[in-house]
C-alpha cells in the first residue's frame, strides 16, 4: 500500500514538475501546445497557410497574434501571408474583399455583421474564412478562432456569426494619477503617468490584447472620484500615447470629468452648467482632446455623490449637468456617461430609494448622447443585491449597467469568488416593466425601449501585480465580464469552462471539478458574509472583514442602518410598513419582494424585518438558519481547499501554490466573518449556537477590537 502511494506520488510530482512554471501574466492567452496529436494534425492542415491581406495596424496585429499563437500551440511553423493565394487554408479578410467567395450561400450580409461582428465559416472547398466589415471584426474573429483552438475544439464544419449585444463594453479603472487604485487589490495602477507620454510600457499592449480578446471596446482610465488635472494639456498628451496604443485593438479611451474642472483647471469662478463661460471652457477643452485623440470616447461623471462636486452645487439638475458635457462632445460623436450612484446622508429617506427619487423625474431630459450608468443593485456592490429599481423605470434614457469586478465587498484579492453567477443573476432578473420577460438585460441592450445607445461597465480589478489581478482566479472575473458584455446569453458555466481550459489545462478531470467549485464560490461567499439578504455589514472605510457593529458617524455608512438587529428580529423593513423602497419596483416584483411569504429567502432581510423565531423556507427559524448559513459557508471554503489540493497534478507549482495559500487565507477569513457576525447577532437573538457547531474561537470583543491599518484600496493615513 505504501509503495503504491509512493509510486503515485512520484508520478504526480513528475507531472507537475514537467509543467512549465507560470506567473499568470499571460492570462487566458497562454497558447499552450496542443496535447492531442490528431487534433494537432488537423489544426496544422487548416492553419498551414494563413492569409491576412492588408497593412492596417490591426491587420498587422492579427498576423502577429496568429504567428505567436500558432507557433506556440503547434509544432510545425506556419506561414502567414499578406496576399491571397490558391494554397490558402485560412483567409482572414473583409467581406468586401471576398469577391472569389461570393457564391458561398452561407456568407453573412453586411447588416448581419454590423461594425464589430464577424463570421467564421468553413466552405466545403476552399479555406476557412474569417470575415467582417471592419478590421476590428477581423481581430475579434481571430481571437474567437484562437479561443476555440486553446480549448482544443474541432475546427471542422465551423459556421458561426457573432455580434456584440451591447455597444459600449467598458472597463472603469478607479485609478488615481499617483497610481494608487481606489478599491484596487492588485498592486498599483498599470498607468505610469509619470513616464508617459514618452515611455510606453509594453504592458499597455498586453492589456489591449487581453481586452480585445474578450471584446472590451473602451476604457475609462481614471477614478470616478476624479482629479481635474487629467484634463490639463500635460496629461492629455500622456493620454494620447495610451489612446494610440489601444486604438488598433478597437479600444477607445474615456476620462472621468470632475465637474468643477472649469474652476480648478480653467480658473473660472464657477462650474455652473448654465454659465456661458463654463460652457465655452468645456467646448474648448473638448476640442483640445479631440485634436489629440480623434476617437476619444467621452466622459464618465460622478457628481453630487460622496462629496464630489456637481450641478446641484449650483441648484441645477443632474440632467443640466450631463447636458453641459454632452453638448460639448456631441460634434465629435462623444458620449457622456452620468452615474446614478447618488445618495446623501442629509436626505432622510432610505438610501435604497434615493437614486430613483433623483433620476426618475429627469427621464426624457437628457441629451441623446447621454447614458445613465446604474450599479447592479441599489446599495453598493454587495455579495448579493436585488436588481436596481431604476432598470426598467427610466423609459426614455439609455441605462448602462455597472458591475464591480474588483472585490471591494467580496474578499479583496484573497477570496476566490467567481462573479459570473452574480452578473447573470442581475441581468436575468425580470423587471416586469413591459410585462413578463422584461429582463434587466433587455433593458440595457436597448431592445425594450428602443434605445440607440447601449452599454455596460465593469469596475476593473487590474493592477500592476505580475498576474494583473492579485488572485489568479480573479482573472476569471475580468474574463467573464468581457464575455458577458459581448453576449450576456452565455452561461456562467460555459464561461468558467472556457477560462479554465485556457488559463490552466483542458484536462477533463481538472475542468470538471473546477467548474462546480467556481460556480459554488458565489453562494459560499454570500453564506459566510451576508446570508439571507443581509448587506453592508463590513468594516468601516476599508471594508475589509466583518463589522456588523459599525455605528456612529454618517448613518448610511454604518452597518446598524442596514441590518437593524433588535431583540425582536433582524433585517430592513422596506415594505409599506417601513421605508417602502419595494414600491419602486414594478407591481409584480413589488408584490413578491414586499410579501414576507413570497419574498425569496435570499432577499428576505433586505426587504423585511424578520422575527428570530419565524420559520424560513428551510423549516429552520431565522436564528437557526443564520447559523446554518454562516457555518456552511465557512465549511464550504475548507471543501474548496480540498478540491484545489486534488489538482496539484494539473497546475504548475507556482500557480498551484499561490491559489492554495490564498485559499488558506479565505478559510481563515470565512471563519472570522462567521464568528464575528454570529456573536454580534447573538446579542439580539439571545439564543445559543445550535448543537453540533464549533463555538467561535474568540469573544465578540476580540473581533470588535481587530484593527487593520494600511489596507489597500483606500487613501491611508
Ligand atoms: C463605493 C466605494 C467608493 C467609490 C464609490 C463609487 O466604496 O470607493 O468611490 O462606491 O462607486 O462602493 O463612486
Image (spheres, helix red, strand yellow):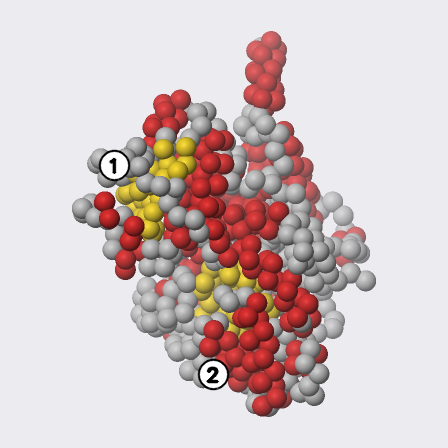
Q: Which residue is mark 1?
A: 126
The N terminus: image quadrant: top right
Q: Secondary structure at mark 2?
A: helix
Which residue is found at the position 60% from the left and 15% from the top?
A: 10
Towards the viewer: 626 or 568: 626
Name the spot of residue 269 as percent of width and height, x first. 70, 88
Towards the viewer: 67 or 490: 67
Q: Quadrant of residue 234?
A: bottom right
Name the spot of residue 102 as percent of width and height, x first. 21, 48
Q: Is residue 445 left or right of residue 214?
A: left
Q: Quadrant of residue 570?
A: bottom right
Q: Which residue is mark 2?
A: 362
Q: Nearer the viewer, mark 1 or mark 2?
A: 1
Residue 633 in sight here:
no
Which residue is found at the position 40% from the left and 61% from the top?
A: 166
- Do the numbered discs 1 and 2 sit on residues whose CB atoms are within 8 Å? no
Amino acid at each position: 500500500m505504501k509503495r503504491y502511494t509512493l509510486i503515485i506520488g512520484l508520478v504526480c510530482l513528475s507531472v507537475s514538475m514537467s509543467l512549465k512554471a507560470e506567473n499568470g501574466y499571460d492570462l487566458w492567452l497562454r497558447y499552450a501546445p496542443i496535447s492531442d496529436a490528431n487534433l494537432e494534425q488537423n489544426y496544422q492542415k487548416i492553419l498551414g497557410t494563413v492569409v491576412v491581406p492588408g497593412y492596417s495596424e490591426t491587420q498587422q496585429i492579427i498576423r502577429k497574434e496568429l504567428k505567436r499563437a500558432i507557433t506556440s500551440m503547434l509544432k510545425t511553423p506556419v506561414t502567414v501571408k499578406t496576399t491571397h493565394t490558391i494554397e490558402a487554408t485560412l483567409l482572414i479578410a473583409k467581406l468586401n474583399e471576398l469577391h472569389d467567395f461570393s457564391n458561398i450561400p452561407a456568407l453573412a450580409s453586411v447588416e448581419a455583421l454590423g461594425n464589430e461582428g464577424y463570421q467564421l465559416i468553413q466552405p466545403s472547398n476552399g479555406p476557412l474564412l474569417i470575415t467582417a466589415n471592419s478590421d476590428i471584426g477581423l481581430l475579434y474573429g481571430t481571437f474567437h478562432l484562437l479561443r476555440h483552438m486553446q480549448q482544443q475544439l474541432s475546427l471542422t464544419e465551423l459556421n458561426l456569426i457573432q455580434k456584440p449585444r451591447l455597444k459600449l463594453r467598458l472597463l472603469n479603472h478607479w485609478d488615481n494619477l499617483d497610481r494608487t487604485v481606489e478599491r484596487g487589490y492588485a498592486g498599483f495602477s498599470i498607468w505610469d503617468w509619470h513616464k508617459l507620454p514618452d515611455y510606453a510600457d509594453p504592458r499597455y499592449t498586453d492589456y489591449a490584447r487581453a481586452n480585445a480578446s474578450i471584446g472590451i471596446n473602451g476604457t475609462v482610465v481614471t477614478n470616478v472620484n476624479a482629479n481635474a488635472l487629467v484634463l490639463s494639456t500635460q496629461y492629455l498628451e500622456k493620454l494620447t500615447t495610451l489612446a494610440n496604443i489601444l486604438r488598433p485593438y478597437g479600444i477607445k479611451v474615456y476620462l472621468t470629468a470632475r465637474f468643477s474642472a472649469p474652476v480648478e483647471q480653467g480658473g473660472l469662478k464657477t462650474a455652473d452648467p448654465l454659465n456661458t463661460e463654463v460652457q465655452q471652457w468645456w467646448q474648448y477643452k473638448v476640442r483640445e482632446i479631440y485634436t489629440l485623440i480623434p476617437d476619444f470616447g467621452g466622459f464618465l461623471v460622478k457628481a453630487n455623490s460622496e462629496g464630489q462636486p456637481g450641478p446641484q452645487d449650483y441648484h441645477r439638475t443632474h440632467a443640466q449637468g450631463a447636458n453641459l458635457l454632452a453638448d460639448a462632445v456631441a460634434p465629435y460623436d462623444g458620449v457622456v456617461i452620468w452615474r446614478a450612484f447618488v445618495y446623501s446622508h442629509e436626505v432622510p429617506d432610505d438610501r435604497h430609494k434615493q437614486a430613483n427619487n433623483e433620476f426618475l423625474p429627469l427621464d426624457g431630459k437628457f441629451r441623446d448622447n447621454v447614458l445613465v450608468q446604474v450599479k447592479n443593485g441599489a446599495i453598493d456592490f454587495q455579495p448579493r443585491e436585488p436588481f436596481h429599481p431604476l432598470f426598467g423605470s427610466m423609459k426614455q434614457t439609455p441605462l448602462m449597467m455597472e458591475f464591480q469586478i474588483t472585490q471591494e465587498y467580496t474578499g479583496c484579492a484573497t477570496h476566490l469568488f467567481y462573479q459570473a453567477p452574480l452578473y447573470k443573476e442581475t441581468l436575468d432578473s425580470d423587471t416586469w416593466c413591459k410585462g413578463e420577460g422584461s429582463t434587466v438585460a433587455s433593458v440595457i441592450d436597448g431592445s425594450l425601449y428602443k434605445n440607440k445607445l447601449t452599454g455596460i461597465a465593469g469596475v476593473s480589478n487590474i493592477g500592476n501585480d505580475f498576474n494583473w489581478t492579485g488572485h489568479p482566479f480573479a482573472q476569471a472575473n475580468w474574463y467573464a465580464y468581457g464575455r458577458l458584455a459581448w453576449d450576456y446569453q452565455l452561461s456562467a458555466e460555459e464561461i468558467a469552462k472556457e477560462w479554465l481550459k485556457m488559463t490552466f489545462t483542458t484536462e477533463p478531470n481538472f475542468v470538471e471539478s473546477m467548474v462546480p467549485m467556481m460556480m459554488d464560490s458565489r453562494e459560499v461567499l454570500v453564506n459566510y458574509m451576508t446570508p439571507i439578504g443581509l448587506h453592508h455589514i463590513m468594516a468601516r472605510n476599508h471594508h475589509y472583514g466583518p463589522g456588523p457593529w459599525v455605528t456612529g458617524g454618517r448613518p448610511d455608512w454604518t452597518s446598524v442602518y442596514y441590518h437593524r438587529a433588535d431583540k425582536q428580529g433582524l433585517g430592513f423593513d422596506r415594505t409599506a410598513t417601513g421605508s417602502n423602497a419595494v414600491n419602486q419596483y414594478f407591481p409584480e416584483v413589488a408584490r413578491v419582494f414586499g410579501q414576507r411569504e413570497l419574498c425569496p429567502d435570499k432577499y428576505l432581510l433586505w426587504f423585511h424585518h424578520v422575527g428570530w423565531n419565524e420559520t424560513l423556507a428551510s423549516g429552520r427559524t431565522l436564528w437557526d438558519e443564520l447559523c446554518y448559513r454562516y457555518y456552511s459557508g465557512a465549511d464550504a471554503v475548507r471543501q474548496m481547499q480540498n478540491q484545489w489540493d486534488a489538482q496539484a497534478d494539473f497546475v504548475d507549482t507556482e500557480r498551484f501554490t499561490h491559489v492554495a495559500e490564498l485559499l488558506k487565507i479565505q478559510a481563515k477569513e470565512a471563519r472570522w466573518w462567521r464568528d464575528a457576525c454570529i456573536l454580534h447577532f447573538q446579542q439580539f437573538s439571545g439564543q445559543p449556537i445550535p448543537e453540533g457547531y464549533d463555538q467561535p474561537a474568540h469573544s465578540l470583543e476580540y473581533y470588535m477590537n481587530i484593527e487593520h491599518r494600511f489596507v489597500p484600496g483606500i487613501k491611508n493615513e
